[in-house]
Amino acid sequence: MRLAVVGGGASGLLASYWLRQHHDLTLFEAQPRLGGHTNTVRVELADGAHWVDTGFIVYNEPNYPLFSHVLAELGVTTQPSEMSFSVSAGKGSFEYRGNGLRLWSQPSNALKPSFARLLVDIMSFNRSARALLQSGENPGSLADFIASGPWGKRLWAHYVLPLGSAIWSASPQHFGEVPAATFARFLDNHGWLKLKGRPQWRTVAGGAANYVRQIAERLGERARIATPVIKLRRHLGSVELLTPLGSETFDAVVLAVHSDEALSLLEDPTPQEREVLGSVRYQQNVATLHTDARMLPKRRLAWASWNAYLPEEPFGKVQVTYWLNSLQRLRAAQPICVSLNREDELEPSTVLGQWSYSHPVLDAKAVGAQARWAELQGQLRTWYCGAYWGYGFHEDAAASAARVARALGARPPTR
């Protein structure tokens, strides 16, 4: 079968990797590079060159089994990472790093009853989240679940909101709309609801683009970069793709782009496609690569791999700084960081690059749409995959790509 795959991000790459030996396949990518959110760049500093990731950075083997299998099959070298988390509020007036003795990185917290209450509430919330999953109940949104509990206001403001919005790069204004069960299930799967037995997080040595490069080499000329698909027309026995180079006809197409982008490509979307694909909203986040240490917590002991920042005035977008020296084990004298949505605060001379990434918003409507995956697949010779069918992470991209690949005759590994 002559098959087109539209989108060279994680799901498109993995679908193409699994399907390439079964079909006459062509991968179309609008950007001049493959990888999507996997975007590794070279940074030249006084102490040498460093390859750093600005989008996708970390994974773990228990919760990313498909992706881990691909890395092993490709022979990609990986290394352990440190997954630590900090919160800094009010220009550093309140800070903590959430593990071990670093909890007391701001010594005055030890004298504050409110901080002791926060720690007690975190443990209580974790127990309640585990009980929620065991009961199978649906308490509604995360905001409703928090409001129904016995916890103080700081639990939401200084733990759940910064942790959740940082994990999903989600808007603080809308994060409470995430279904409580979805949030609890994700935390439980990734070991956040317990103090011991958390998975070992890992990064791709030398940058995640190494796995993209390995897949690209196997695809060869079947991958066309800088070739955007403008429109997609479905006919009785074929699918027509329009690009700046003209029109090409295929037997079927896999749309491995965000759901809103997929919908915009369809010349004749069905009512189901409009409803399901249109149910997922997206949040645009500006990611800036820099060396400005002021974006990290005020206290050096509070520096963590993920550093959530809570501005004094309410802000509509997540503000978090990833400390890549810790996440990627970079041997750099300066801190190398990626900050989301803090571009106006940075010292211009420290900026090394800037990108805009779009992330799905996991509200109840989006979760409901995910349950309707089977309604769209294969209809009018069109298949859909992407991280938006799950939590929005690399393993979700891999899982949806595997489902499509399996339906089209390939045999990707099972989870």
Image: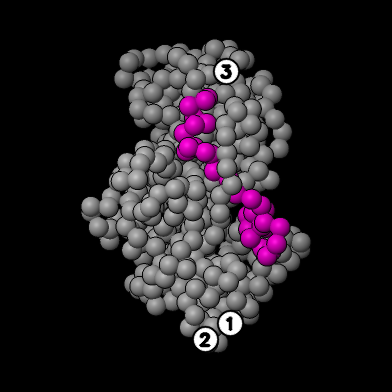
Q: Does the segment drawn in magenta span residue 184?
A: no
* Point 54% across, 70% down: residue: 102
Residues 69 and 375: in front is 69
For the residues marked 1 and 2, what is the alpha-carbon distance in whole angstroms? 7 Å
Q: Does the segment drawn in magenta span residue 194?
A: yes
Residues 240 and 129: in front is 129
Ranked by sequence position, the earlier of labels 3 and 2 is 3
Q: Nearer the viewer, mark 1 or mark 3?
A: 1
Q: In the picture shown, does residue 266 fall above or below 198? A: above
Residue on which the image places disc 2: 112
Q: In the picture shown, does residue 193 fall above or below 77? A: below
Amino acid type, label 2: Lys
Indicate the position of residue 142 as horizontal and vertical percent values.
58, 65
For the residues marked 1 and 3, what is the alpha-carbon distance in whole angstroms? 56 Å
Indicate the position of residue 178 as horizontal and vertical percent values.
55, 59
Indicate the position of residue 398 as horizontal and vertical percent values.
59, 35
Residue 376, by quadrant, is top right
Q: Crowding near pointer 1: few (<14 within 10 Å), some, many (20+)? A: few
- Disc 2 is placed on an element classified as loop
Residue 404, by quadrant, is top right
- In the rendered image, the quadrant that contains the N terminus is top right
The residue stretch that appears in magenta? 186-215
Furthest residue in direction front, as rendered: 47
- In the rendered image, the quadrant that contains the C terminus is top right
Furthest residue in direction right, as rendered: 134
Residue on which the image places disc 3: 20
* Point 39% across, 78% down: residue: 93
- Disc 3 is placed on an element classified as loop
Q: In the picture shown, does residue 359 fall above or below 129? A: above
Amino acid type, label 3: Arg
Q: Nearer the viewer, mark 3 or mark 2?
A: 2
In contact (CB < 8 Å): disc 1 and disc 2: yes
